[in-house]
Amino acid sequence: GNSVTQMEGPVTLSEEAFLTINCTYTATGYPSLFWYVQYPGEGLQLLLKATKADDKGSNKGFEATYRKETTSFHLEKGSVQVSDSAVYFCALSAISNFGNEKLTFGTGTRLTIIP
Amino acid sequence: NAGVMQNPRHLVRRRGQEARLRCSPMKGHSHVYWYRQLPEEGLKFMVYLQKENIIDESGMPKERFSAEFPKEGPSILRIQQVVRGDSAAYFCASSPVSGGYYEQYFGPGTRLTVT
């Protein structure tokens, strides 16, 4: 079945540091890939997505490239801010036999940025 | 426009009691998804519903768990005779349509603790 493995946390960085959170996946077919972010007390929000190989998703300074050859979708940001402190989830989607989208998530990586 | 609402945010039940978790989708959304996050694991798909219909319940445990999404009112995830292994965070998401990728908007989750 489909699965997502992401870098274990927690991760603590200083403000303006470079961020990488690793994510690899196992799937049949050609899934779409996502990063979701969860701020304290809130629901998950879609951060970025990529729907085919070599696509790059980007948003709010974050980027991730869909690498089919390494089955990876690593999240990067060049200069993190305190406001980026949150839990980040890597996910993939697959269409079920019923035609609906089913998301499979990694375990989440808690990121804390210190001033 | 209010987001996806879930209540209660925290729920404590003794073993053998019933737990009822509620999810109000975003205005205009008629598709609801429930996910469960067990400790130290990623979110796992449980069930997908449209108004008055269960479309895909392939992720639901076969016993004690049920879900509904009535014509009026919130979607309900019901767990009968809870056991300690049911302790988890339960997330609801909604989307305006399905059958292809439309962003799922997540609620803040209900954290169920079974004592």
Image (cartoon, rainbow, N blue to C red):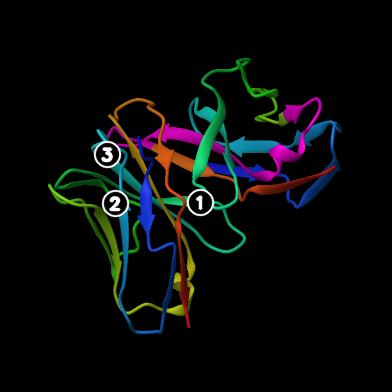
Q: Are marks 2 and 1 on the same chain?
A: yes
Residue B13 horizontal side relative to residue A63, left or right: left
Range drawn in magenta: A76-101
Quarter holding residue B80: bottom left
* Residue drawn at (56%, 52%) of the image: B42
Residue B22 visible in the snapshot:
yes
**The disc numbered 1 marks a residue on which chain?**
B
Query: Which residue is more in the foreground, A73 or A11?
Result: A11
Relative height, residue A90 to residue A107 (above, below): above
Dot 2: few (<14), some (14–19), or many (≥20) neighbours within 10 Å? some
Which one is earlier in the sequence, the residue at label 2 or at label 3? 3
For mark 2, what is the residue?
B57
The residue identified by callout 3 is: B31
Q: Quadrant of the C terminus of chain A?
A: top right
Residue A82 lies in the magenta-colored region: yes
Q: Which residue is mark 1?
A: B43
Amino acid bearing label 2: Glu
Q: A69 and B106: which one is in front?
A: B106
Which residue appears at 34% of the width and 40% of the height? B94
Residue B63 in view, yes or no: no
